[in-house]
Amino acid sequence: MAVSYLNDDFFSRLETLALNLNSDLSGFFGGKHLVRTYGQTVEFSDFREYMLGDDIRRIDWNLYSRFEKFFVKLFTDERQMHVQIFLDCSASMGKDNPQKAAYAVGVCAALGFLAVHNTDKLSFKLMKNNGIDDPFGTIVGKNSFFRAINELGKMEFSGESDIAAAVTQCQNVGSNDGLTVIVSDFFTESDWKKAIDYLCYKKRQVLLVQVLTPNEVEPVYDGRVNLIDVESADLMDSKNMKVRITRSLQRAYAQALNDYKDELKTFCNSRGADFISVTTDNAIEKVLFGELLKVGIME
């Protein structure tokens, strides 16, 4: 992959950011995400009346002396979340476009860095054909993260991917314990809606990141052209076509793309998930500061 966003300056610019995960998530003990349940931290939150079985060491004797009733102190609870990033490794994501491939990897790396920077667990799931690769396992800490990123930056994009199959067949998606991110252009015939429904059933917080190139948003083709699908098997594949590009066809394409993005956003909203669409000519940091702040994933 000739183009790369992965360098020290890139990661240093991310250190002031943090992922903002739902306080309803359960997670694991020992993290930095404040949740609505009460726990074992040193930060006081509230009082409640003593009940049989409560730790008597938490009784507030000053309140007892005033009200002659037993009250126990409650403290805030902080959890470690599991951030899972599913990356579409199909040909349309970068086989003939190294910049798009590098940008998608850069988005994954940025979100992954924010996870380990805040002591969360991290997994990279690579969606390939009808399955999924989990080459790095669960990543904890920056040393493991940078080793994984070094390998991720060398990855090749090819073939097709089935988002629904990859997500639903994943063995360790977890339940109610963190954020799942799907990074793709969503130019797929697979049932991506099924993947979102499955993740919501698992009570995961969900974010879809659509990565497009400027040429995919506003194609510059004109006249009679042969359109070759990068995911086609050969030149005789039915995905390939000969067309005459006219202004009306360009307008129809633009409308179809906007309608598809609206469908993605509307469906995500209906499931309580988040969706953003970005183009590779925008700095990744701008995406994180701008788009993710808007949907509440970043703070």
Image: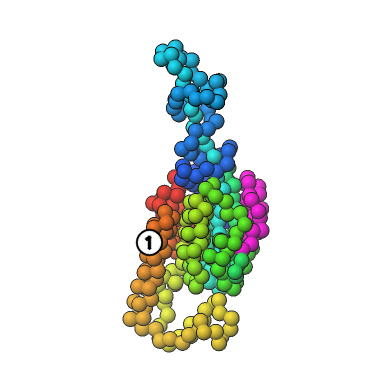
Q: Which residues are magenta?
A: 132-152
**Residue at 56% in and 79% down:** 232
Residue hosting label 1: 266
Residue 217: where, in percent of width, then height? 41, 70
Badge 1: how crowded within 10 Å, few (<14), some, or many (20+)? some
Which of 205/86 is in front? 205
Where is residue 202? Give x, y as percent: 52, 53
Asked if residue 266 lies left or right of residue 181, the reply is left
Q: Callout 1: helix, strand or loop?
A: helix
231 shown above or below 183: below
Residue 82 visible at all: yes
- In-image side of 117 versus 64 (left or right): right
Nearer to me, 43 or 101? 43
Residue 92 vertical placement versus 247 (above, below): above
181 or 299: which is nearer to us?
181
Magenta span includes 208: no
> Looking at the image, can residue 7 be seen?
no
State which quarter of the image contains the C terminus: top left
Which quadrant holds residue 170? bottom right
Q: As shown in the figure, which amino acid type bears the numbered disc 1?
A: Thr
Percent coordinates x, y for residue 138 in the rendering: 64, 51
Q: Is residue 55 left or right of residue 48?
A: right
